[in-house]
Image (cartoon, helix red, strand yellow):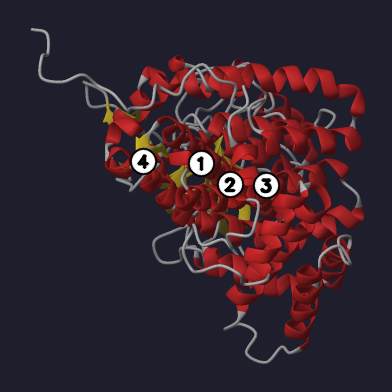
Amino acid sequence: MAATTHTVTNQPPPLVGHDVYSGDRALTEGVERHLGALAPELLGEVREELAVLGRAAGSAQAQEWAAQADANPPRLRTHDRYGNRIDEVEFHPAWHRLLGQAVSAGLTDAWGRPAGHLRRAAGFFVWSQVEAGHGCPVSMTHAAVPALRADPELAAVWEPRLTSHVYVRGQEPAARKAGVLFGMAMTEKQGGSDVRANTTVARPLGGAGGSSGAWGSGGAYGLTGHKWFCSAPMSDAFLVLAQTEGGGREGPTCFLVPRVLEDGTRNVFALQRLKDKLGNRSNASAEVEFDGTWALRVGEEGRGLRTIMGMVAATRVDCVLGSAALMRQALTQALHHTEHRSAFGAVLIDQPLMRNVLADLALESEAATTLALRLAAAYDAGTDEEQAFLRLAVPVAKYWVTKRCTPMVAEALECLGGNGYVEESGMPRLLRESPLNSIWEGSGNVQALDVLRALQREPQALNAFLQEIGRARGADHRLDAAIKGLLTELADLSGIEARARRVAERMALLLQASLLVRWAPPEVADAFCAARLGGDRGAAFGTLPHTLDLAALVERARITG
């Protein structure tokens, strides 16, 4: 029956059919700036590659897949109908479509192609705005490469599979698959982030084993123990930490655990349950038990933390990228709603107070995006100076950007009013997702203490960091004063551990300010320095000084295509 009581007016149209990449000025300018320095001959190719992905990300089809994957979380099947142990995780078809698109777009292929980290980071930023949960196996697979390179023989076998652009679902020997996914299992109930407290034991195996590829130089072991968090448990292989027998070693050792052995038999990989999580609901996180589980040693015995830190650092960059992507998507939704919604006689986006809120959100988003791209470009440059810079910049950025994500997404949700609190808007999914990256790969305290560790033990990292922020010295008096304040703070190491978060925050803001002063439009840099360094704002978003060019900030953030 036709409705006769009212007609629907003053509601925004669906946000579909736009290019998530090309419509983002901060992102496109950042990619072209860094690519121009790294590999200018690739500009046209990368621009088109990312625009294709951007159009896919803005399509109605991708948004439908995202909603379906989130509404239909994975299911654990421990046994088949006959009682045989199978330990499989079933996913909705939409999950596989999202993951397949990510792999085919090269989001696990950064380490071997020109400007690979930059183009991969930009793609990860774009596609994560569709749905963040499937990004976990994408990130793990990408990040496994530097860890495996601790054993060149293993890397030679596995790296081509990890960086493949072919997604092959299902459990079978990795040697038979054109592309594979990797997961990770480090933490245990009793230890959490303190992985040296792990109790999983690795015992050397004699004779032949069911190798899934070359054995590498470390040999085969049997693992016995448990993992409290196993990321992406449907993957083809995992990097795992375990204690080797014998004592006298420095710490746990890193191992590669294949899901299916070369002869087709399933490795012992008993999934006890899947975690019921706040967000990230399309992705599976599991508890797993090992009982003589076949594994290959990666790197030196007792040096597993050093071996796996390359993976950890890469996934921490993805935490920055993932949070920046959530922030951008939340901002995009807020901008779209407010430019189509009227209240009190005017379109919301044109009203002074809403403009202040949107400008503040835009400022936060651009600062996060610019910093994330700078990290990716440093990976591509690969110089000793850039590696030293990353040693401090990665935990600094991971600490701050992931911390800013949740309050920003919550504020963007509020821009939609009650509509934003309703599941159909998609904003609750973004809000539930927003705390994850601050916890994953080391929570805030872990990151802040890692910053202190680098400051105290690696002077070359501090030198590289100070050189980076110093490149903008003299361009803004507020930045100059903040740099001086940081140097004063670092000169006094008394009570430094209790001040670790304060130090990490100040370093992050200085780095963001330096990048924006050098590369962003003047109105963006001026607003950031005034609000984030000069203290000319309140504690909530939307309290920027009214004398700033707020309209220009909002206009810059609007979708352009």
Mark 3 and mark 2: Cα distance apart in space: 26 Å
* Residue under numbered circle 3: 314
> Residue 353 in the image: x percent, y percent?
46, 53
At numbered mark 4, what does the secondary structure look like: helix, strand or loop?
A: loop
> Residue 556 in the image: x percent, y percent?
65, 38
Identify residue type, mark 1.
Leu
- Mark in front: 3 vs 1: 1
Q: Between residues 390 and 253, which one lies in front from this camera angle?
A: 390
> Residue 236 in the image: x percent, y percent?
53, 29
At numbered mark 2, what does the secondary structure look like: helix, strand or loop?
A: helix
> Residue 51 in the image: x percent, y percent?
67, 20
The tag on residue 362 is 2
Label 3: how many Cα within 10 Å (few below 14, some 14–19, many 20+):
many
Q: Quick one: label 4 or label 3, which is nearer the N terminus?
A: 3
* Residue under numbered circle 1: 331
The tag on residue 416 is 4
Residue at screen point 63% across, 60% down: 547
Mark 3 touches mark 1? (CB < 8 Å): no
Label 2: how many Cα within 10 Å (few below 14, some 14–19, many 20+):
many
The image quadrant of residue 12 is: top left
Residue at screen point 77% across, 30% down: 156
Marker count (numbered): 4
Q: Vertically, is 463 above or below 336?
A: below
Q: Between residues 213 and 380, which one lies in front from this camera angle?
A: 380
Mark 1 touches mark 2? (CB < 8 Å): yes
Q: Vertically, is 15 above or below 495?
A: above
Identify residue type, mark 3.
Ala
Q: Quick one: label 4 or label 2, which is nearer the N terminus?
A: 2
Identify residue type, mark 2.
Ala
Residue 267 appearing in the image: no
Q: Quick one: label 1 or label 2, which is nearer the N terminus?
A: 1
Mark 1 touches mark 4? (CB < 8 Å): no
